[in-house]
Image (cartoon, helix red, strand yellow):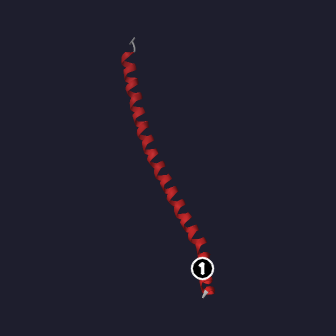
Amino acid sequence: MAAEHRSALSARAAGADSWCAGRAAEAAHAFFATLAQAAHGAAEGLEELAGRVEAAVGAYDAVEDAASPRS
């Protein structure tokens, strides 16, 4: 009976490596998917910020033009 338990335990232990590798691969995939999602969100935020800066520059130029003495 002890030999049967050792054999079953050995078989399960042999499968643990592949299970651990599979779980590690899943965790790495989830990490990089989250990182990609964050980068995409940051890119959208930067595009919005660029639009606001562009609008502010346009408004500044308009005020500067209006305040400049005309010849």
- Quarter-wise, where is residue 53 in the image? top left
| Residue that lies at the very extreme toward the front in this rendered image | 2
Is 18 drawn above or below residue 55 in the view shown?
below
Q: Position of residue 40 (x, y in %)?
A: 46, 49
**Residue identified by numbered label 1:** 9
| Residue that lies at the very extreme toward the bottom in this rendered image | 1
Is 40 drawn above or below residue 12 in the view shown?
above
Residue pictured at 42% horizontal, 37% vertical: 49
Q: Position of residue 45 (x, y in %)?
A: 43, 42
Secondary structure at numbered mark 1? helix
Residue pictured at 62% horizontal, 76% vertical: 14
Going by the image, does 68 lie left or right of 35? left
Residue pictured at 39% horizontal, 29% vertical: 56
Q: Quadrant of the C terminus?
A: top left
Q: What amino acid type is highlighted by mark number 1?
A: Leu
Q: Quadrant of the N terminus?
A: bottom right
Q: Nearer the viewer, residue 64 or 53?
A: 53
Dot 1: within a 10 Å radius of its alpha carbon, few (fewer than 14), some, or many (20 or more) residues?
few
Is 42 drawn above or below residue 8 in the view shown?
above
Residue pictured at 59% horizontal, 83% vertical: 5
Q: Nearer the viewer, residue 3 or 38?
A: 3
Q: Position of residue 17 (x, y in %)?
A: 61, 71
